[in-house]
Image (cartoon, rainbow, N blue to C red):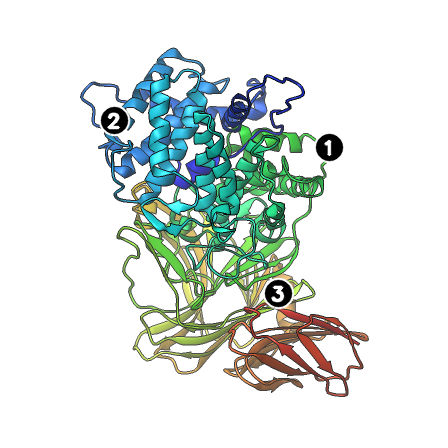
């Protein structure tokens, strides 16, 4: 398969095999450290020693061989050529040489890896040496000035070039190697600055990528100072750690203490840029381990902690959640399965050089991800998505009976610093993609993510352990982009986003986006919708109570004359499927194109997905439809553009029709993922979670069985005896004599929030230092929320 630029870079750097080549001077006093580290770098690309006859490597070798052989057969070696491949012409263009170097790396990897049809082939080697000289002459050389996309000059091309030089180093003439190293030194002199804009400091994934490039350049040039520059770039020694990767940031790019990861200043990007950072930093740590240039920054633990708090909650059985993949959702050749597989491979790579306590935990988690992915992923299981190096690490874990696969992670996670919420149960997960004036609703540009208009407006992703392909199997090119689950939308016609060069983001004007988590298990979230290019406004909340998600909307108002809709579900049923749909006990037609108005519907059940309850009835509509689309309609990027091949998928859609220009309209629905039809009907009758407020002042639910009361206050108000003196999210759980409370200010507007409880409390048992309590028959908590950036404050009372 032909990979995208980021995916190619990611898989090429998918790291060392399960063991790292030793670097011990005592074993050989004359050992050359550069040769040893270069051999280790080659191992990171080829997987080192492995049995090419082992059937477990067959798929990875076949994929490498097929792609490399295709590039080799199509390589233009004629004297008058203007490009190495007809589709990448002219080679002088940055986008063209930027894509040509990765193809040469694929050829070089196949040449250097045992078991391919190109292994050790003299003609292939000669072709590679000639092709490298050609690209250097017409495209990537020090005399040129950057033009077009800076990424090709400073990351894409140099990384692939340095990888290729590592693989061919014993066969490269000295003058050629010096020329290529010189070109990279011109465009990537250090990891710290953007070469085409020296005042711009590199951050996050871009800094990590450049550190690897500089390190490989230093090894090939046998230059100790350059290697030190690469190592120090991870910690940003140049600027006293200001942009170092091993720290928690409170704004801008990087890892946040709550597990968030942001890149491009305002984009939730754990699944792409965050993963690249994890991979590149982890690769460099493994590459330099035990040498004079080893990474010894004590704060590297930030990277270790990120595996558990940043990545694990957004990996569902090895699938990376789309809510944290930014514009990558529009890339045909980088679906959620592939980005997830890459992230898992990076976790295992980091384990090779991490303290044992971390490494053991990650290998257990990775084994669970991979095994469940293989069991339920019909599109592309793990082994078909990674190369030999990553497969070697995975095989070592899978074949070790002492590594027992972890169960699915459960819990509730609020990423206040990137406006994301993840609720995980043993069989499913639900993720919210929110946005605010702090975090963008979408990113688009360079022809990517052309239809991402509503992806940050409360889109609700439901991940089912029995169907890992809901969003990876042709979802984005075939789904109705105006009807994304969880969103409330003005049905106006939109134009394509990001058709020009460069990338840009849209941040709405609302302040409220986020929520609170109680006991690590229950949650409430809210978002004020201020629609882009419309007068539409709405107040949206979600309550996560064990196996149910209650969604409420209030104050839905617009004056543009267009119909407004709230989408409950728009489920990908894949190609040709017609699962049973039951509404209020009555089976509905399976024909495509069926639709119905359901003003009094109380519950619905979709076979293979779960149940839906409508506590207040309609105006609900339902639709079965077969939709056809292309990836090209979403992405026309120079190196990520999709194909024009039509894809067809079937969908089941439920939505509330609020009519044209609604005034203070509302909705209420409950998601019961994985529930049977009988369980859904029973839930609808018994209402174990009750809606007790649903207006523009407060939206709230209670579960008497759990002793749980959860509310979001849009203003000072009271519900069921619970009072707040201003906006905020409050959850209270009373079990016997134990009371736990969670409070957050997702709008970040208050200094303190005062909460009065509806039952007596004698004392504060424990709590954050921001919480004080006045006990009594109607106890009052005063929570200092100012400066907490929307994070949760907790207390336990008795």
Image check: 737 left or right of 656? right
Residue 314's disc is none
Residue lying furthest bottom? 777
Q: Which residue is mark 1?
A: 401
Distance between the Cα atoms at labels 2 and 3? 62 Å
Q: Which residue is mark 2?
A: 137
**Residue at 27%, 41% in the rendered image:** 146
Q: Is residue 370 positioned above or below 532 on the image?
A: above
**Neighbour tally class for label 2: few under 14, some 14-19, many 20 plus, Cα within 10 Å:** few
Residue 63 at x, y = what percent?
45, 27
Give the residue furthest to the top: 122
Asked if the residue at tag 1 contacts the one at tag 2, i.e. Cβ–Cβ closer than 8 Å, the answer is no
In the image, what residue occupies the spot 57% across and 77% down?
728
List the residue tagged with mark 3.
548
Q: Residues within 10 Å of mark 3 (few under 14, many from 20)?
A: many
Mark 2 vs mark 3, foreground winner is: 2
Give the structural element (helix, strand or loop) at label 1.
Answer: loop
Instruction: Using the image as rendered, state which of residue 183 and residue 468 is in the foreground.
Output: 183
- Contact between labelled residues 3 and 2, with CB atoms less than 8 Å apart: no
Among numbered discs 2 and 3, the one appearing first in the sequence: 2
Up the image or down, 255 lies above or below 698; here it is: above
Q: Quadrant of the N terminus?
A: top left
Q: Position of residue 738 (x, y in %)?
A: 79, 73
Q: Quadrant of residue 546?
A: bottom right
Q: Nearer the viewer, residue 785 or 682?
A: 785
N-terminal of the pair, mark 2 or mark 1, is 2
Relative to 202, is 94 on the left or the right?
Answer: left
**Residue 152, percent from left and from top:** 33, 39
- Bin the neighbour count of mark 1 within 10 Å (Cα to Cα): few under 14, some 14-19, many 20 and up: few
Looking at the image, is mark 1 or mark 3 earlier in the sequence? 1
Of residues 138 and 69, the one drawn nearer to the viewer in this rendering? 138
Residue 653 in sight: yes
């Amino acid at each position: 398969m032909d990979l995208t630029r980021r995916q190619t870079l990611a898989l090429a750097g998918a790291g060392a095999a399960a063991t790292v080549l030793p670097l011990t001077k005592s074993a050989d006093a004359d050992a050359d450290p550069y040769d040893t580290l270069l051999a280790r770098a080659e191992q990171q690309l080829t997987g080192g020693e492995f049995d090419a006859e082992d059937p477990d490597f067959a798929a990875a070798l076949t994929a490498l061989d097929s792609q490399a052989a295709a590039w080799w057969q199509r390589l233009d070696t004629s004297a008058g050529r203007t490009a190495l491949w007809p589709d990448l012409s002219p080679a002088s263009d940055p986008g063209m040489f930027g894509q040509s170097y990765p193809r040469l790396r694929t050829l070089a990897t196949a040449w250097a890896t045992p078991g391919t049809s190109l292994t050790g082939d003299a003609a292939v080697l000669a072709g590679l040496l000639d092709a490298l000289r050609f690209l250097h002459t017409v495209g990537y050389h020090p005399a040129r000035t950057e033009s077009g996309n800076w990424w090709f000059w400073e990351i894409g091309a140099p990384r692939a070039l340095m990888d290729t030089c590592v693989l061919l180093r014993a066969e490269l003439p000295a003058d050629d190697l010096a020329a290529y190293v010189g070109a990279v030194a011109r465009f990537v002199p250090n990891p710290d600055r953007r070469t085409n804009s020296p005042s711009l400091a590199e951050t996050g994934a871009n800094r990590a990528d450049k550190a690897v490039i500089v390190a490989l350049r230093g090894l090939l040039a046998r230059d100790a100072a350059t290697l030190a520059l690469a190592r120090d770039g991870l910690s940003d020694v140049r600027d006293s750690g200001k942009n170092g990767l091993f720290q928690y940031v409170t704004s801008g790019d990087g890892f946040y203490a709550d597990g968030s990861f942001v890149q491009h200043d305002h984009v939730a990007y754990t699944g792409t840029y965050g993963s690249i950072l994890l991979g590149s930093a982890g690769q460099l740590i493994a590459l330099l381990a035990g040498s004079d240039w080893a990474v010894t920054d004590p704060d590297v633990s930030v990277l270790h902690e990120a595996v558990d708090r940043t990545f694990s909650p957004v990996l569902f059985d090895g699938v990376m959640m789309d809510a944290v993949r930014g514009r990558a959702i529009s890339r045909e050749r980088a679906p959620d399965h592939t980005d997830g597989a890459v992230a898992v491979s990076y976790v295992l790579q980091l384990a090779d050089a991490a303290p044992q306590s971390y490494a053991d935990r990650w290998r257990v988690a990775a084994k669970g991800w991979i095994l469940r992915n293989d069991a339920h992923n019909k599109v592309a299981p793990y082994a078909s998505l990674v190369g030999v190096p990553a497969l070697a690490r995975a095989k070592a874990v899978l074949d070790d009976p002492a590594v027992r696969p972890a169960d699915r992670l459960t819990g509730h996670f609020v990423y206040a610093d990137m406006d994301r919420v993840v609720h995980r149960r043993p069989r499913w997960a639900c993720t919210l993609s929110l946005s605010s004036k702090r975090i963008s609703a979408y990113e688009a540009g360079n022809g990517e993510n052309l239809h991402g208009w509503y992806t940050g407006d409360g889109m609700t992703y439901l991940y089912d352990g029995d169907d890992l392909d809901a969003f990876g199997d042709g979802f984005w090119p075939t789904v109705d982009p105006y009807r994304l689950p969880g969103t409330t939308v003005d049905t106006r016609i939109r134009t394509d986003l990001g058709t020009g060069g460069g990338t840009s983001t849209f941040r709405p004007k609302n302040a409220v986006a986020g929520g609170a988590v109680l006991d690590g298990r229950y949650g409430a979230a809210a978002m004020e919708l201020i629609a882009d290019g419309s007068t539409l406004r709405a107040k949206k909340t979600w309550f996560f109570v064990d196996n149910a998600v209650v969604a409420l909307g209030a104050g839905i108002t617009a004056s543009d004359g267009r119909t407004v809709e709230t989408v409950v579900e728009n489920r990908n049923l894949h190609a040709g499927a017609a699962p049973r749909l039951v509404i209020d006990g009555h089976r509905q037609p399976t024909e495509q194109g069926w639709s119905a108005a359901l003003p009094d519907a109380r519950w619905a059940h979709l076979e293979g997905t779960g149940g839906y309850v409508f506590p207040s009835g309609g105006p609900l509509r339902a639709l079965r439809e077969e939709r056809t689309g292309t990836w090209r309609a979403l992405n026309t990027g120079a190196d990520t553009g999709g194909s024009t091949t039509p894809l067809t998928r079937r969908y089941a859609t439920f939505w509330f029709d609020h009519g044209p220009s609604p005034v203070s309209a509302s909705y209420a629905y409950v998601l019961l993922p994985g529930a049977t039809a009988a369980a859904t009907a029973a839930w609808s009758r018994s209402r174990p979670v009750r809606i007790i407020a649903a207006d523009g002042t407060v939206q709230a639910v209670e579960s008497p069985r759990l002793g749980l009361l959860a509310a979001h206050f849009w203003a000072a108000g009271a519900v069921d005896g619970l009072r707040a003196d201003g906006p905020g999210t409050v959850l209270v759980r009373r079990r016997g004599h134990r009371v736990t409370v969670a409070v957050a200010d997702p709008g970040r507007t208050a200094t303190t929030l005062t909460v009065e409880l509806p039952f007596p409390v004698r004392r504060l048992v424990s709590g954050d230092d921001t919480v004080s309590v006045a006990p009594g028959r109607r106890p009052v908590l005063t929570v200092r929320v100012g400066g907490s950036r929307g994070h949760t404050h907790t207390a336990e009372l008795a």
